[in-house]
Image: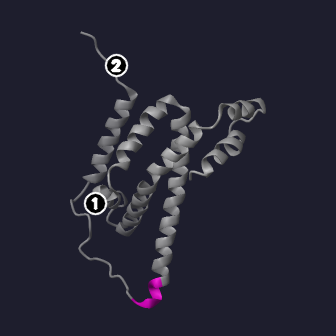
């Protein structure tokens, strides 16, 4: 009988699942503390709450832009990453954000523990905003990079554009209109 060697990806996924199980079930099953912090509804706190919401959205959009640029570019230039990123993004974009909202809040509260549950809720909100925008950004970057004309790519090679200069002079201008 032929024995199959262990695949590093399978081992990595198994370690990730075990680590996730340890994080989720490391102590008591309560997620929220019994004493809930009170929300001050006076008008003087309204600017603070508005600023917190805006900063949360800005942080999430910056992170989703960075992740979208990197993932879309990797999917466009590497066949291996293409086979991983595009199907995953296609499947994950079809799941509504509300479908995994409770799981995300639970996970982030469990990660940050019962001592800082507010940070867990904030991180869950940022994660959910990222996931609502990320899939379109990945597909936009992928399409833009794969449709860069071959003569432009050849000219950039002839001028010696590599690495960051290639990214700045060829790739970013190509993807800007889609983003």
Q: At 36% across and 47% down in the image, what residue appears?
A: 92
Local secondary structure at mark 2: loop
Q: At 39% across and 38% down in the image, what residue appears?
A: 87
Q: At 41% across and 66% down in the image, what residue appears?
A: 122
Q: Position of residue 105 (x, y in %)?
A: 32, 61
| Residue span colored magenta | 42-46
Residue for badge 2: 5
Residue for badge 1: 102
Q: Position of residue 127 (x, y in %)?
A: 41, 58
Q: Position of residue 76 (x, y in %)?
A: 54, 36
Identify the mark nearer the N-term, 1 or 2: 2
Q: Quadrant of the N terminus?
A: top left
Q: Position of residue 93 (x, y in %)?
A: 38, 49
Local secondary structure at mark 1: helix
Determine the main secondary structure of the stretch shown in magenta: helix
- Looking at the image, residue 38 sits to the left or right of residue 84; the answer is left
Distance between the alpha carbons at the discs numbered 1 and 2: 38 Å
Q: Is residue 119 magenta?
A: no
Q: Nearer the viewer, residue 71 or 153?
A: 153
- Looking at the image, residue 2 sits to the left or right of residue 164; the answer is left
């Amino acid at each position: 009988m032929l024995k199959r060697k262990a695949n590093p990806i399978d081992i990595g996924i198994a370690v990730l699942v075990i680590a996730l199980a340890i994080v989720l079930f490391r102590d008591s099953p309560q997620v929220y503390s019994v004493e809930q912090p009170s929300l001050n509804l006076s008008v003087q706190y309204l600017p603070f709450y508005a600023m917190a919401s805006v900063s949360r959205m800005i942080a999430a959009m910056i992170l989703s832009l960075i992740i979208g640029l990197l993932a879309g570019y990797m999917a466009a230039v590497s066949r291996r990453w293409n086979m991983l990123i595009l199907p995953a993004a296609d499947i994950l974009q079809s799941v509504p954000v509300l479908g995994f909202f409770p799981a995300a809040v639970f996970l982030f509260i469990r990660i940050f523990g019962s001592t800082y549950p507010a940070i867990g809720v904030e991180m869950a909100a940022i994660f959910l905003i990222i996931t609502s925008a990320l899939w379109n950004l990945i597909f936009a970057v992928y399409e833009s990079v794969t449709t860069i004309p071959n003569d432009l790519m050849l000219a950039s090679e002839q001028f010696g554009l590599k690495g960051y200069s290639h990214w700045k002079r060829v790739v970013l201008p190509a993807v800007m209109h889609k983003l």
